[in-house]
Amino acid sequence: MTRTAVGFIEAEGFVPIFDAVDAMTKATEVDVRGTVRLGGGLVAVAVSGELATVEEAVEIGEETARAISGRNVKSIVFASPAEPILAIAGDVTIIGS
Amino acid sequence: MASTDRAIGIIETRGVVALAAGIEAMMKTSDVRTIAVERVSSGYLAAAVQGSLAAVRSSVDAGTQAVRQYGELRAAQIYPKPHAEAGALLENGTSRRLQGSIAALESGGSE
């Protein structure tokens, strides 16, 4: 079974993430798994799909979020994520609301 | 589970990007299980792994390095022989949810 790639973007505030999701879904066919409020103003979004799609989406999303928030935008892409990473991407309520 | 495989390692980070980087590094460095993810608040998250002491030690070392690379590391601790009551603090229901991952990823919609 091919495992899907997973990516996360997080930023301070909801608007950068909203904008990132908008840009990512318009530009690529990535699956947005959900957004999550981590507390303290941190908001994150998890995406999954083929590796090339996820890499492209996360790059676009991070750029978009950074254009608004200026700083404190972080991202990561997992080509072949470990089980707990898949679990978190599949059900982001594990790490927040 | 062998009685020697009960060491616990915990890393605490701010943000999910750093946490995920840490978990990935810990899981892929040595033979440990991720037994819990703890939500604190204010963006702080902790992940706990369990296995033999040597495995936990090397995984926490790798995890802390990965976390520093991607964000903020709050704490990293190794418990060679945690007391049952301390271990019970990690039983917050995430252990089971962290296993059923592939199903979750496939069944969940993409709204």
Image (cartoon, coloured by chain):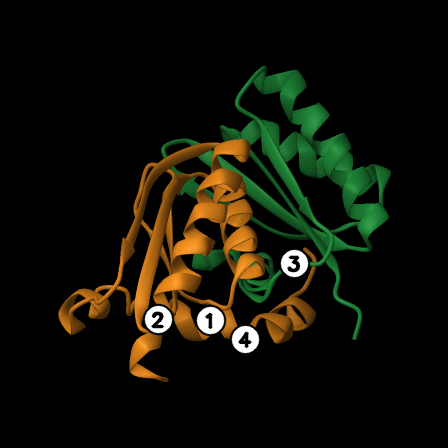
Chain colours: A green, B orange
Q: Position of residue B35 (x, y in %)?
A: 39, 68
Q: Position of residue B9 (x, y in %)?
A: 34, 57
Q: Which residue occupies the foreground of this view, A71 or B85? A: B85
Which residue has dot 3 on it? A81
Q: Which one is closest to the eye, mark 4 or mark 3?
A: 3
Discs 4, 3: same chain: no
Which residue has dot 2 on it? B93
Could you tell me if residue A88 is visible in this image?
A: no
Q: Residues within 10 Å of mark 3 (few under 14, many from 20)?
A: many
Q: Chain of mark 2?
A: B
Describe the element under mark 2 as helix, strand or loop: loop
Q: Is the residue under label 1 in contact with that under label 2 (CB below 8 Å)?
A: yes
Q: Amino acid at mark 2?
A: Gly
The image quarter containing residue B85 is: bottom left
Q: Spatial distance from mark 1 to mark 4, Cα to Cα?
A: 5 Å
Q: Residues within 10 Å of mark 2 (few under 14, many from 20)?
A: few
Question: In the displayed structure, would residue B87 be above or below residue A64?
Answer: below
Q: Is the residue under label 2 in contact with that under label 3 (CB below 8 Å)?
A: no
Q: Amino acid at mark 4?
A: Gly
Q: Is the residue under label 4 in contact with that under label 1 (CB below 8 Å)?
A: yes
Q: Spatial distance from mark 3 to mark 1, Cα to Cα?
A: 16 Å
In the displayed structure, does residue B71 sit left or right of residue A69?
Answer: left
Discs 2, 4: same chain: yes
Which residue has dot 1 on it? B97
Q: Position of residue A35 (x, y in %)?
A: 56, 46
Describe the element under mark 4 as helix, strand or loop: loop
Mark number, residue B89: none
Discs 3, 2: same chain: no
Q: Residue at x 64, y 21 (%)?
A: A66
Q: Residue at x 75, y 61 (%)?
A: A4
In the displayed structure, does residue A18 sit left or right of residue B61?
Answer: right
Indicate which disc, 2 or 4, sits on the residue closer to the N terminus. 2
